[in-house]
Amino acid sequence: MNYIILGVVVIIAIYFIGVYNNLVAIKNRAESGWAGIDTQLQRRFDLIPNLVETVKGYAAHEKDVFENVSKARAGMMSAQTVGEKAEADNALTGTLKTLFAVAEAYPELKANENFLQLQVDLKGTEDKIAFSRQFYNDTVQRFNTEVQKFPQNVIAGMFGFKEKQYFEILNEQAKQSVQVKF
C-alpha cells in the first residue's frame, strides 16, 4: 500500500515538473521572440536618421514631416511595454509613409544611390519585423493556452506564470508595411 501511495506521489511530482518545465520553455521562447522584434525595431530605428537626412537634402522645406518622424522615433525609444511599443510602432510606420510620400515628389531623390540602398534596407527590416511579430504572437498564443488549460493553470498560478500580451497593431493603416517602391 505504501508503494502505491509513493508511486502516485512520484507520478504527480513528475507531472508537476513536466508542466513547469514546459511553461518555462514556452515563456523563454516568447521572450526570445520579443527580443527578435526589439532587435528589428532597433534596426529600423537606426536606419531612420539616415533616411531623413537623405530626404532632407532634397526636400528641406518639408519641416513638419521631419519633425513628426523625429517625434515618432523618440516615442519608439521611450516605449517600454509590448503595448507601448506596438503603439509607438504604429505612429512611426505612419510617419514613414508620409516621408516616402514626400520623397515621391522629388525625382532626383528617387534616383539617389544612398536613398535606394536605404529603401532596400528598410524593406528588408520591415519583412523581418513582420516575421518576428508573427513568431512572437504564435509563441504567446501557445504560452497563454498552456497557462489557461486545466490543470496547467493551477501549476502556472502556483509558480506565478501570467499570460503575455500580444504584439497588436490597432491602427488599420499601420498594419501595412512601409511602402518603399517608387
Image: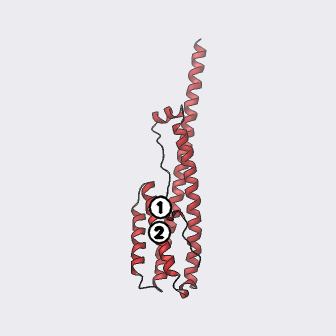
**Mark 1 burial class by Cα count in 10 Å: few <14, some 14-19, many 20+:** few
Callouts 1 and 2 close, C-beta under 8 Å: yes
User: Residue 171: which disc?
Assistant: 1
The three-letter amino acid code for the residue at tag 1 is Asn
User: Toward the viewer: 165 or 98?
Assistant: 98
**Mark count:** 2
Q: Nearer the viewer, mark 1 or mark 2?
A: 1
Q: Report how far apart the C-alphas of labels 1 and 2 lie in the structure.
A: 9 Å
Up the image or down, 9 lies above or below 68; here it is above
- Residue for badge 2: 94
The three-letter amino acid code for the residue at tag 2 is Gly
State the SS at label 2.
Answer: helix
In which quarter of the view is residue 20 placed?
top right
**Residue 137 visible within the image:** yes
**Mark 2 burial class by Cα count in 10 Å: few <14, some 14-19, many 20+:** many
State the SS at label 1.
Answer: loop
The quarter of the rendered structure image containing the C terminus is: bottom right
Left or right, 107 with reference to 79: right
Q: Position of residue 108 (x, y in %)?
A: 54, 88
